[in-house]
Image: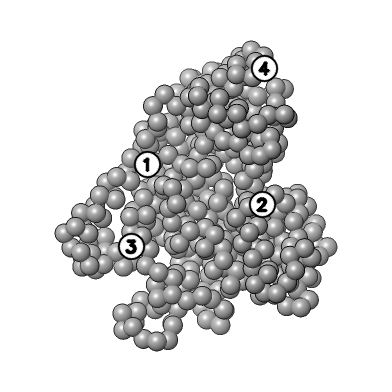
Amino acid sequence: MNAEEMDARDDLRGFRDRFHVPADVIYLCGHSLGLQPKGVRGYVEQELEDWEKLGVDGHFHARNPWMPYHRLLSAKMARVVGAMPDEVVVMNSLTVNLHLMMVSFYRPTAKRAKILIEKGAFPSDQYAVKSQLRYHGFDVRPSLLEVAGGDIVDAIEQEGETIALVLPSGVNYSSGEYYDLECITRAAHGKGCLVGFDLAHAAGNVPLKLHEWGPDFAVWCTYKYLNSGPGSAGGCFVHERHAREWQLPRFAGWWGHDEESRFRMGPEFRPMAGAEGWQLSNPSILSLAAVRASLDSFDDAGMERLRAKSEELTGYLERLLNGRFEIITPANPARRGAQLSIRIPGGDRSICNRLAADGVICDWREPDVLRVAPVPLYNSFHDVFQFVQRFCAMLEVGSLRSVSLP
């Protein structure tokens, strides 16, 4: 079965038509910025029209009133990450949300002050965590544990009594490794640690069951696999067991204040229950409209079907590349998402630039990794085949023959 035949049997192939796919381009960069859903324009224009006609009254009288607008997203986003609707809120941006969550869930003591992250975590996570350690008066070197993904559970078992917060990514941005988040959560809680996840490369990409697994919090962006536009609003999960823990320290803002009394403008902060209580300011409605449009497709496709196609796409890509290049992403489909990272010793960013000149969009991570992400909502098996054909021709690596899935 060749790529065209595999595309013909793909029951998700129609979702590609829901996206603006750049002409004459093979787009394999959804791990960095997802393509624009066609539904975004209508949703955003509706809010622009209501703003034009209603002004401030749009907060309560728009077709979708702006004050509770974020709730239009909660149930659908919750289904993407395996949560209860009141455990999820779309707000701020990823690193802002990460800092807000560490205010509440990084509570160091003299004996338990360390933060554990995976080795090679995304730089913004490293910056945020180091700044929190310094803010609390701790030296970074002894207080930050950076552990290879496969060693996280062992590190928790060995040093858990000194760890305050376990904070790995869901999927490592460089290698594409999908960590066993359920196992990490169980091990960390067993040692008395709090647990949070950066799901930037996991939300909308891999199956998540946040409510069931029970981390204390998670944060993610929406512009990668969730296709909500550059700099779009981020997502935040707070487990329901913390929904009414009013004593938790938090940075407060009026959008997290009790909705019934918010507009009385009282001086005392009364947080709403659930994740909503961590909101600060009223959100950008135009950004939320874009998130809403993207979530429509996830709700229609379902994460189970998207995951099944993702495994087929990366499996096909792996077979085409087999023996030609070193793939640093785990070979086990259960331990990776919609990304393969290819190590090219001696290579540099010019490889990515040459691919772009040949109509292939992926990206480069220093020092020698090409990241390729066939996204199941809008990429095809033909996309994968064409990428490998052009990639091998560019590097003059063997001839390419069609490879079928079993």
The nearer-to-camera label among 1 and 2 is 2
Locate residue 36, reporting x and y percent: 39, 41
Residue 213: image quadrant is bottom right
Secondary structure, mark 2, is loop
Q: CA distance from mark 4 to mark 2?
A: 32 Å
Q: CA distance from mark 1 to mark 4?
A: 36 Å
For badge 1, the amino acid type reads Pro
The answer to whether mark 4 and mark 2 are in CB contact below 8 A is no
Which residue does the numbered mark 1 point to in the structure image?
A: 37
**Which residue is pictured at 48% across the width and 42% down the height?**
33
Name the N-terminal-most of marks 1 and 3.
Answer: 1
> Total marks drawn?
4
Name the N-terminal-most of marks 4 and 2.
Answer: 2
For badge 2, the amino acid type reads Ala
Locate residue 205, reporting x and y percent: 54, 45
**Which residue is pictured at 19% across the width and 57% down the height?**
52
For badge 4, the amino acid type reads Val
**Which residue is pictured at 40% across the width and 87% down the height?**
267
Q: CA distance from mark 1 to mark 3?
A: 19 Å
Please, which residue is most extreme toward the bottom here? Answer: 267
